[in-house]
Image (spheres, grey):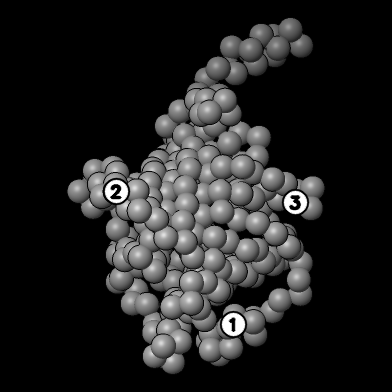
Amino acid sequence: MKKISILAILLTPLLNHAYAETPEEKGLSIVVEADIRDTGWTDQIADMSMLLKNKQGDSSKRVMRITTLEVPGDGDKSLITFDNPKDIKGTAFLSHTHSLTPDDQWLYLPALKRVKRISSSNKSGPFVGSEYAYEDISSQEVEKYKYKWLRDETLNGRGSFVIERFPQYEHSGYTRQILWLDKEMYQPLQLEFFDRKNSQLKTLQFLDYKQYLDQYWRPGVMQMTNHQNGKSTRLTWSDYKFKNDFSDRDFDKNTLKRAR
């Protein structure tokens, strides 16, 4: 028995080395764990305000509601309905996110009484004049990216994994993104975006997290800053409600025209 024990001790470092995770495997496993922890909430609805600022500090505000349906085995479905200001009231945006194929997205413009489909090659365009692109506001499915763990570090007093991810969508406006993922919540703290020239374009900060249903963490604020044009967009979330018995029928194209 002693010989076996000694042999095991000698072989353990070799075995551990042989099966050590690569940075790519570690990055993927961390993101998969985050996805597992945020599964099962079924659906949610929340109020959201959008504050847009230009380089000179001038600002404008929009108020909306966002409803989301969790779709097992595929990406989530979401509906954003604008309530204020008056000139965009009734505008609605519907997104069917997919894991492996391009997302389906539509925009309803009440002034034209027309539903406009967002082209799969135009997802890098700005969402209603904000610093968020259409691809930023779809659900972030694991399969949409390839991953690489870079390091562990502390961000704003929170231990985090730092993971580089590479969009697999051919028309993405980004070459790569760097994600800071909280080690306790397994939720994003910060996301940096790099444009097609691999220059830093934007930084998104996730702030004021609260836990719901004793399991699911949601941010109260999402602050997007564009480093190239000096503009920013701040989303403030409130009044989250979960498990509202929504169904696919609440997220079809006909819903856009009924949105008020």
Read off the residue under disc 2.
56
Task: Please provide percent x and percent y for residue 249.
Answer: 65, 85
As drawn, is 143 to the left or to the right of 171? right
Label whose residue precedes the other's in the sequence (3 or 2): 2
In which quarter of the view is residue 87 placed? bottom left
Read off the residue under disc 3.
212
Task: Please provide percent x and percent y for residue 193.
Answer: 35, 47
From what the image shows, is residue 168 above or below residue 127? above
Task: Please provide percent x and percent y for residue 50.
Answer: 49, 59
Q: How many marks?
A: 3
| Amino acid type, callout 3 | Tyr
| Amino acid type, callout 1 | Arg
From what the image shows, is residue 220 above or below residue 2? below
Judged from the image, the secondary structure of the residue bearing numbered disc 2 is loop
| Amino acid type, callout 2 | Gln
Residue ID at (44%, 46%): 204
Which of the two marks, 3 or 1, is nearer to us in this view?
1
In which quarter of the view is residue 43 placed? bottom right
Which of the two marks, 3 or 2, is nearer to us in this view?
2
